[in-house]
Amino acid sequence: MKMKILIAAIVLALFSVNVSAQSRFLVGGEGGKMYDNTTIALLGVGEFPIGHRFEVGIRDSFSPYSGHTALGNGHANSARGSAILWMSKSFGLAGNIENNGYTAGSVTKNSFYTLDGVIIRRMAQGSPVRFEFDYVRQVDNQVADIQYVNGVRANGTEPDYLQGGRFDFDARLGCSGKVCYRLEFETQVGHVLTQGDPNCDGTWGPDTCGHRASAISGGALISFKLEFPRRKATENDPF
């Protein structure tokens, strides 16, 4: 719900300012494995430059197939709102807030993350590319999927308190007809806490069964997108 409100606010803001004619829309698909979760998803993106210095974006990824270790298969959705402040023609500051939710078996979980860092745009091997380096942190630290037995909390899916780093590479490979082709690769690595028992690990009371274990995890996603409308005069310029 919070992410839907955020996206609605961004869309309303776009109607109240002079949005650049360079706005871009993308559709495509992505797949990969991130933090032991396998996904195959449909992707929609909007990128809205505002003047020469500022850009906002929205992104939604729906996965009809989402595999989770120890939980089984289900479906998932990831929504992201982003903002970029370009300090120069090639270097900017990036801020993102992301909402990830999934249902697998009897478990439904929803988490929020911030992804903040720097972004670089340039030409590489004849193609316009973007490189983004972010610090990733889970900010919604609540026990989810709480079940009650005779009025007493019996269990819950605990947050993983992710803290890590993210690298994203996004390239416009070429154009034909009315669209251009974009290839994106994202990888993350971070420190997480493994799932514990909130009844006895200190979440809901005294620590009687030991602290939650930690682990280093990560993964990668790759996506292919069609970008439109095609603008022949600027399609080979950094975006």
Image (tube, grey):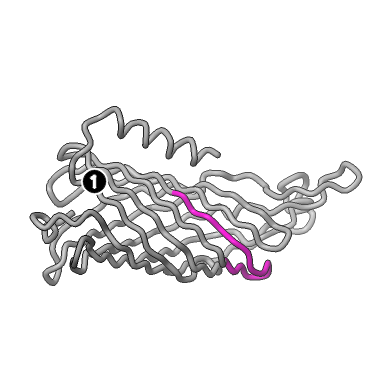
Give the residue displayed 32% in from the left and 65% down from the top: 184
Could you tell me which quadrant the C terminus lies in?
bottom left
Magenta span includes 220: no
Q: Quadrant of residue 21?
A: top left
Range drawn in magenta: 66-79
Give the residue displayed 52% in from the left and 44% down from the top: 139
Q: In this view, which residue lies farthest toward the top?
A: 16
Give the residue displayed 19% in from the left and 46% down from the top: 22
Q: Is residue 226 left or right of residue 20?
A: right
Above or below, 157 against 142 in this view is below
Q: Who is closer to the viewer here, 191 or 54?
A: 54
**What residue did someone put label 1 on?**
23
Q: Quadrant of residue 213?
A: bottom right
Could you tell me which quadrant the N terminus lies in?
top right
Q: Main secondary structure of the magenta part?
A: strand
Q: Is residue 13 left or right of residue 232?
A: right
At mark 1, the secondary structure is loop
